[in-house]
Image (cartoon, coloured by chain):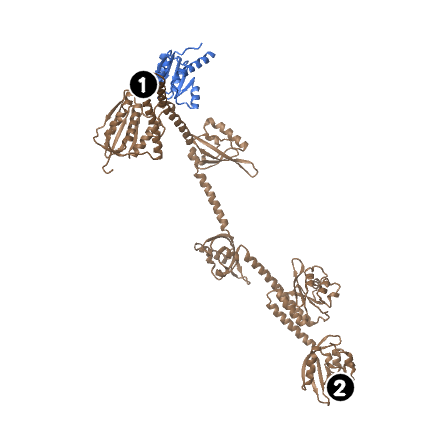
Chain colours: A brown, B blue
Amino acid sequence: MKPKSKERFDKPAPQTDFSFDFLEGLTEGAVNIDKDGVIVYANHGFANLIQYPLEKIIGSNFVYYIQENQRKVFLDLLQEVHSNRVEYSLISKDGSQLYVSISIFPSHISESDSFHLLIVNITKLRREQKLLEASDAISKVLGESVSLHIGAEKIIQILKVYLNWEVMVIWVWNERKQCLDCKEIAHIPSIDISDFKNANENLHSVDNLTIPKRIWAYNKPIRIPDVTLEPNYLRAAAARKSKLRGALAFPFFEDSRLAGVVELYKRDSYYEEVDEELLALLTSLSIGLGQFILKKVAEEAKDELSTLLNFTVNGIYSVDKEGIIKSWNMGAEKIYGWKSSEVIGKPITIIYPEDQLGEFVKNKEALTSGKILEPFQAKRKRKDGTTVWVDISLGVVYDKEGVRSGACAVVRDITAEKRNIELLKLNEERYRSLLEATKDWIWEINHKGFIEYSNNSIEQILGYKQDEVIDKSLAYFVQIEDRENVANSVERTLVEKKWTLNDPIPFLHKNGSLRWLVCTAVPLMDEEEKLTGFRGVSQDITDLKNLERLKSEFISVTSHELRTPLTTINGVLAILAAKKLEPDQTKELIDLAYRNSQRLSKIINDILDIEKIDRGILSYHFRPIPISDLIQEAIVTSQPYAEKYNVKIEKRDNTVNVLIHADFGRLLHVLTNIISNAIKFSPSGESIVVSTQVVSDKIIVSIEDHGKGIPEEFQGKIFEKFTQAEPSSTRTNQGMGLGLSISKEIIESHGGTLSFRSIKNQGTIFSCELPLYRENQ
Amino acid sequence: MAKTLSKLLVVDDDEDLLVIFKYCLVSLSDVEIKYAVSGEDAIRTALDFHPNLILLDVMMPRMDGISTLRVIKQLPSLSHIPVAFITAKAQEEEIIDYLNHGAIDVIVKPFDPLKLPDTILQIWNHWNERDVND
């Protein structure tokens, strides 16, 4: 509350005898007051200070010039008799605040109590002091704050205390966008500036009318007493809503480079002059802030980078000169399984497998010598001991002085890729080995029909080496009479882009033998769907063909062999049923039927035996038997047959009680079979010889005939099933071609061997070699 | 006017079967029948006997039916004699093969012995009709 002029000047000035003439020349204020504070005397110095005319000052009460909250203190002090000096705030006529130091001296010159007051203006001193304190506080804040946001909050609180600024806006130059970005808006907590905040964020500093842009352009502070009244102030409406009036804006620098603009706002109008002291504060603030902001921006960028580095899937780590791990990002954690806390300070060799340590030394030497290493792939060890494949880029790290301080690595986990490549290789290998392992001939022909690829099987199938078939046509390998046909078919296939040679093709083996191949192929196309050739598989079905032929022959032979006796039996029964016959005729026919049914059952038994032999289930009843009994029985059994062919059987057996361990029935079957063969192939009137010979622990039974001998080309196949020397159509009417095959099997089951020697037009000798019976057998 | 069958040669290496032939061909009382047990025997007999018709087994040792037929067809004095095969080897393609070789018909074993005389006469008549038409 300002002193009322009425109160101040109503009272008449008290009379005094004291002369104050000597005080008139003082620039400081000198005042004499009575014990109630009424001014008895005031010099011009005081009048100048508070800017009231002297005549109005005299008679007024001094307390009215003192700021209201300090008046009581002043009046209390007047009750004390001793001198003192206290600082007060005075209010001058224009309402501005003055800081003064008032020294009070009690006066004993007159009877009545009065006080001499010496008033020294310390406003400027005080302000300087405050600015200095503010400056210190701000410096401290800038030094301690971890972020621009926190720093700005603290600074505006300091500025509020010392200079009554309530809002601070920081604009930072964006080099890329070539404009000022509103980086931070800080304010004291008791004020709501949301409208003003929005206005700032929406303000485009590229507009030259904005304060930040103007400061940027003029590079010096601007003071606006009341922004709401400022015509060029674009944020006036928002400022009005947030009740902001006074403003001060100034640039700040980083290394003498203009870095941004700071705006300060307060809710009072701002008329104070921007004096040297304030400029000094602003300068120090701007420099401190400039450094701070750029440091924080850099730190944030660094934080961003480190976040980026940390979260990248690539492993990034660094080591010092000794190979001790200095940094280790999350990527590295993921790749190697080691946490950064586990590995920092440890040697990098923990990720090297034992057998790769040489590589570490090599890399270290290379980096030391300043070599630039190309990225390479390497095997590393994970924490759990498993192997990880990485793609590594190594680089040298230099310190600020440019001295090599270590190395850094960027690694990428390529284990999966590697595995895929391995798998691919494996698959390729598999296919290759499959191509080479298959019995089928796999080939490729080009669009002209010439072979471009062949697997190894060609050698097995047609007897040619792989490289002998390259550049030849398929037709080249078929028998001459089919060449033209095959060549035409291949040509048509190439035109129609569809493989049509689906029937078995008779190829010629290099040795001249016929090979039946079934060829299937798929067309090969290039990217433009143009036929480039065919890839095919040719399967050798020669054996299959032979088998088919054999099967057909078997059926033919079997049916013939079964039908012939059946025809006779059938005939006998039909005749017996239909005709009245003489008893001897009837007997003849019944004998006929009986003999033929015997034949039938022998054939069926042979077929069953061979099937049992194939399945390994032909049963034997071994016992010791004299070989002579067996020979005798075989000859007796064969006698009627021999007589029929007019062949004599000569026995040369001198053995007496020579035992073999045998199944009598089955060996008899073998011997009669061989003997009947010998009879069959002997010319009429000839004889066959059945002889025995003991050689050490074996006995050899030989059956010799004097026939034409076995044709040479047939000798190799004589023991095969369903085989007879002559083509099927001329096959002797009895026999399935199973006899020798069964015989050989039976002899071998007795631990013996069956072999023969045959000379053309001289005859054949079959020899059964059987082990002699031993007691403990 | 169709010729009457008066001479028939039956060739089979299975002598048991020849017995059956003899019994069941008794009914062909007007036909003189001779038997042979091999291809060679058949040629020899035919040259001597001049049959009107030959029934020839296929599966015979040394000289089979087809070889025998081939020889018959090459001998001027025999080549006009019709030959029918009588065989158990009578799969479809085999029968075609026989006919291609010049056989006039095929009797399949086992045959019905009581019907055999009629079958032979049918074959003979059939052949003769064809001959007349020529």
Q: Answer with left or right where residue A14 lies relative to residue A170.
A: right
Residue A734: percent from left, percent from top: 34, 24
Secondary element under disc 1, as helix, strand or loop, is helix
Q: Disc 2 or disc 1, which is closer to the eye?
A: 1
The extreme left residue here reads A656
Foreground pick, B20 / A290: B20
For the point 23% across and 36% down, the residue is A774
Q: CA distance from mark 2 to mark 1?
A: 194 Å
Question: Which quadrant, please, contains the C terminus of chain A?
Answer: top left
Q: Residues within 10 Å of mark 2 (few under 14, many from 20)?
A: few
Foreground pick, A467 / B104: B104
Residue A682: percent from left, percent from top: 30, 22
Residue A761 visible in the snapshot: no
Tell me which corner region of the image, top left, top right, bottom left or bottom right, holds residue A546.
top left
Dots 2, 1 in contact, CB < 8 A: no
Chain containing the residue with disc 1: A
Q: Amino acid at mark 1?
A: Thr
What's the mark number on residue A21? Answer: 2
Number of numbered discs visible in the structure rendering = 2
Q: Amino acid at mark 2?
A: Asp
What's the mark number on residue A284? Answer: none
Chain containing the residue with disc 2: A
The answer to which of marks 2 and 1 sits earlier in the sequence is: 2
Is A21 rendered above or below residue A734?
below
Is A678 rendered above or below residue A617?
above
Question: Which quadrant, please, contains the N terminus of chain A?
Answer: bottom right
Q: Answer with left or right where residue A384 lies relative to residue A233.
A: left
Q: Answer with left or right where residue A579 lies relative to residue A541.
A: left
What's the mark number on residue A586? Answer: 1
Residue A352: percent from left, percent from top: 46, 56
Secondary element under disc 2, as helix, strand or loop, is helix
Tell me which corner region of the image, top left, top right, bottom left or bottom right, holds residue A652.
top left
